[in-house]
Image (cartoon, rainbow, N blue to C red):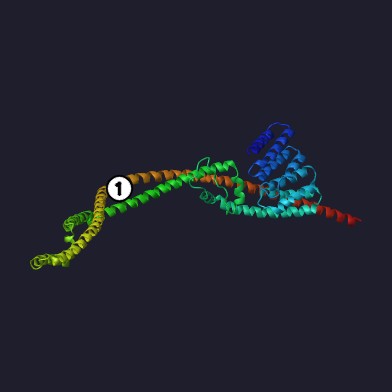
Amino acid sequence: MWAAYAFLNLAVSYTERDVHINQVDAVFEKAKMLTKYTQHPESLEDKINLMAGQFFFATGRGRSAIKHLKEVSLDGAFTSKALLTYGWALTEQWQYHDALQPWYMLKTNHSPLNQDVQETLIAIPHLLEKLNAKVMALGAFDYAGEQYEMIYKQLEESAKRLNTGEFIEPLLAQQIPDKWGAFAAIDLSLPNHPDRIYLKDVMSKSYFQGELKNLRDLHVMRSQLNSGIEQLAAFEKVQITRRDEYQQVKNDKRINLTSRQLLKLNKRYKTLRATVDKAFKNPSGVGLASEFEKNQLASFKQLNTDFKALDENGHYLQRLRRVEGVLKWALSQRYYERKKEVSKNLAILDGKIKQTRRQLKAAKLAFRSTPKSFNGFDKKVARLRTKYQQQLKRLDIVYQKQREKVGGIVKLDIKKRQKVVMDYQLQARLAAARLFDETSNKHRVVAGAEVRQ
């Protein structure tokens, strides 16, 4: 994957040294062959062809330049620069008619705000003049002057927006807050900005990106300091809330009242346990008998005495014992069921009481410890706030300087663009005036000859 980039860097280094042209071309071709192993082969191949074409054109080898520039795609990021250089390479080979085609294509399919299109606007009429189409050249110069006037006005409007540096805030806002530092990539898209076409070129420069990263890091530091100050304010509110709640609990004597209520509940619980133990003392279940059943048991005793005196054979006594036995068996069965149920309920109640005791103990501990959560923090918070504010004040000064530095790069780029457009416009007007004079003089000479005849 990286082999294509390695050969491309090697080719660039060859162009800066005195290396034979055939060797440079071979390295460019090798880099193109290896682009198929990269993630974006078409774009990289266009870049290699453009770099090779520009190198060969700059060294006066127009045919080699044409060969590479013709291979650049017509819908890529390098199309405009390739079409412009392709036209100049054809012009160098005296192929004026052929040179017009890529330039007309460039002018038609791209925005006038593109610097390559702006150069084409002045190049086309010069080429027409070389073809001796002076009337067409005069019209093309006039058209170029009008276009440059419109472009300059748009540049002025963009300069008013960009000189204020307003593009910096949305640029910083779209960055990932936690990503900062020299090795953290920066998002340069600005999809909805009206001046993106100008910013795109200047933001592609490493110098601008380095300064913008510094500004981004300062922006992150400032955000963190502001966040720290906000957290201190929130902590102060929590302190006030804790103090107020503590005072309210203290004034209401909630802890003492709860302790007294729990003591009363403990006494009632002990009384209840004593009553339950007394009721379940006799396993026969007599302690759990109702008043009616107790009366029946008492009547059985009385009848037992009466039947002994009357019934010599004991038939009635046996029947009485059977009835009494049925009642006692029912009472004993009820005893075990009730004891199981009551034991279960007492265990739950006992657990609740223990839990309440633990909660009361924790509440007492929290009540005693609560003053530690708000006493003594006022001075610490004030010191931290002062420290953060001083750091933020110093940071704001550095941030504004860095912001002006980043904005200054864009201002300088806009001024350079304005100067280039003004130079193009001046050339177009002077050439149009010259052609107008030449064509007018020619008509006057023809008219004078006809008069003399």
Relative to residue 271, is residue 54 drawn left or right? right
Q: Residue at x 21, y 62 (%)?
A: 330
Residue 167: where, in percent of width, then height?
55, 51
Q: Which residue is mark 1?
A: 373
Relative to residue 45, is residue 203 drawn left or right? left
The answer to whether residue 438 shows anywhere in this view is yes
Compared to residue 333, the image places residue 422 above or below, namely above
Residue pushed farthest right? 453
* Closer to the camera in the image, 367 or 428: 367
Q: Residue at x 74, y 48 (%)?
A: 123
The answer to whether residue 165 shows anywhere in this view is no
Residue 141: where, in percent of width, then height?
74, 52
Image quadrant where residue 293 sits: bottom left
Work out which quarter of the rendered image holds the C terminus and state it: bottom right
* Closer to the camera in the image, 111 or 248: 248
Residue pushed farthest front? 313
Q: Amino acid at mark 1?
A: Ser
Residue 27: where, in percent of width, then height?
70, 35
Residue 226: where, in percent of width, then height?
42, 48
Which element carries disc 1, helix, strand or loop? Answer: helix
* Closer to the camera in the image, 255 or 170: 255
In this rendering, the count of numbered labels is 1
Relative to residue 232, is residue 453 drawn left or right? right
Residue pushed farthest left? 309
Categorize mark 1 by other alpha carbons within 10 Å: few (<14), some (14-19), many (20+). Answer: few
Work out which quarter of the rendered image holds the N terminus and state it: top right
